[in-house]
Amino acid sequence: MVGKTPESIEAIRPLKEGVIADFEITEKMIKHFIQKSHSRNSFIRPRIIICIPYGLTQVERKAVKTSAMNAGARDVILVEEPKAAAIGAGLPIQDPKGNMVIDIGGGTTEIGVISLGGLVKSKSIRVGGDKFDQAIIDYVKKKFNLLIGERTAEDVKIEIATAIAPDKEMKMAIKGRDQVTGLLKSIEITSKDVRDSMSETLVEISDAVKQVLEVVPPDLASDIVDNGIVLTGGGSLIRGLDSYISKIIKLPVYISEEPLLAVAKGTERMLDEIELLQQIQSTNA
């Protein structure tokens, strides 16, 4: 619906860049999900686990909890996303070994080194799928004088985006409005164009990974060298991103089995295993 609504309808994103952008709508959204999961029984007050970016401030964490409580939750438990992503990816995070995960979501990229159920080192940057989309929009506007929307940019990212040069460059036709003439037109964009547009954003992510690796304790560093690094989140589906990061940090990088669902599956497992949840829930919540 974004970018396609009539004047009588406004498309709102209650969550943006990993934080609450609209408290009232966020509460209504959570309330809707509670009722949907409990067959619209409004008397149910469930326990809710919410995954949050590692970099949230105490004020932002409190705002998340308050929104969920106002929506009808009995109890709200906050868990940092790197932990949930690692659990969902099947990493043995309770072992005394270092595991590193990079979760590239829509609003943030979460990088975490986990051992004995806790985050040893972590970093959260407000760079993710949304920033890739915006970079494509800006690039097309600058190079082709063509105005395109978020939906088109996301389609381009999904269809032809690559982090490294492929054996054969891909092409895709996109439509938009010409900035000069004001008329509608169609152009052809290549995977090289998309790669160029995303280059700065990819550098931001790889720099953040390097910063975390620079402060990892030596004993855990040796575990990461042995185990490699796991990529999760929708952003990890960009072709060649694992090879791109691996080439920069000189370590093996793997994409988890279902990267889009890693955080959700990790959360599900925590709900099923209360002991696991008690061990890894956020100490700052």
Image (cartoon, grey):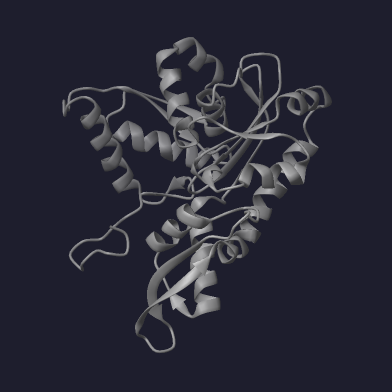
- Tell me where residue 44 appears, x and y as whole percent: 22, 22
Q: Residue at x 77, y 28 (%)?
A: 225
Task: Judge left or right: residue 212 versus residue 111.
Answer: right
- Tell me where residue 252 appears, x and y as whole percent: 72, 34
* Res. 135 image quadrant: bottom right
Quadrant of the snapshot with the N terminus: bottom left
**Height in image: 84 above or below 155?**
above
- Tell me where residue 190 appears, x and y as whole percent: 54, 66
Q: Residue at x 55, y 48 (%)?
A: 238
Decide which of 53, 230 is in the foreground and name it: 230
Task: Judge left or right: residue 64 versus residue 285.
Answer: left
Task: Judge left or right: residue 66 versus residue 130.
Answer: left
Q: Residue furthest right?
A: 218
Decide which of 164, 61 is in the foreground and name it: 164
Q: Residue furthest front?
A: 168
**How many numbered marks appear?**
0
* Res. 270 image quadrant: top left
**Height in image: 13 above or below 273?**
below
Q: Residue at x 63, y 22 (%)?
A: 118
Q: Residue furthest bottom?
A: 181
Q: Residue at x 58, y 60 (%)?
A: 169
- Tell me where residue 184 appears, x and y as whole percent: 34, 80
Decide which of 281, 196 is in the foreground and name it: 196
Decide which of 171, 271 is in the foreground and name it: 171
**Height in image: 175 above or below 22?**
below
